[in-house]
Amino acid sequence: METIRVKYFSDDSPRLCYVEGKSDWIDLSAAEDVTLSAGEFRLIPLGIAVALPEGYEAHIVPRSSTFKNYGILQANSMGVVDWSYRGSGDEWRMPVYATRNTSIPKGSRICQFRIMAHQPRLVFETCTSLEESDRGGFGSTGK
């Protein structure tokens, strides 16, 4: 079991909770009330800074109900927090784009994250041909 140090920016911020066997994803909440107009971009503070272990990163994505409930899209599709982003002031944020006028109350669970090991070291080798058969092009597995 790995211990992860977390700094909360407010005493009333929801505490991170990992329940083994339930889900590998851990919920994150808006750290303040947020009001957005349609077409507006904002970095929503999540109220935490985390000291990830060296060699790990966090992947942040919206919860499945976030768009339905608030009409926001994560602007970069998936957020990646590298282990080196670990200072006391390095608050995690969710970059969002509002598709409609919306209000997100403080404490609303809007995204989730999981911790992953960094990709192993790779070496790319140039070749003129690959031995595998073609699959049929982009989108071919849906036929």
Image (tube, helix red, strand yellow):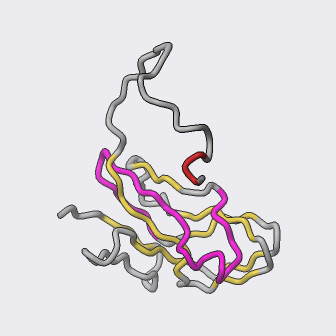
Residue drawn 31% across the image and 45% down it: 55
Number of numbered discs? 0
Location of residue 11 by image quarter: bottom left
x and y percentages locating residue 70 in the rendered image:
68, 80
Tell me residue 10's x, y (percent): 47, 79
Horizontal side of residue 67 vs 40, given as left or right:
left
User: In terms of depth relative to the viewer, which is nearer, 87 or 16?
Assistant: 16
Please tell me whether residue 68 belongs to the stretch shown in magenta. yes
**Relative to residue 33, is residue 99 depicted above or below?**
above
Residue ID at (39%, 69%): 25
* In the foreground, 1 or 64: 64
Span colored in magenta: 48-75
Q: Write down the quadrant of residue 17 in the picture.
A: bottom left
| Quadrant of the snapshot with the N terminus | bottom left
Q: Is residue 97 left or right of residue 131?
A: right
**123 vs 75: above or below:** above
Residue 5 at x, y = what percent?
A: 30, 64
The quarter of the picture where residue 136 lies is: top right
Any magenta on residue 59? yes
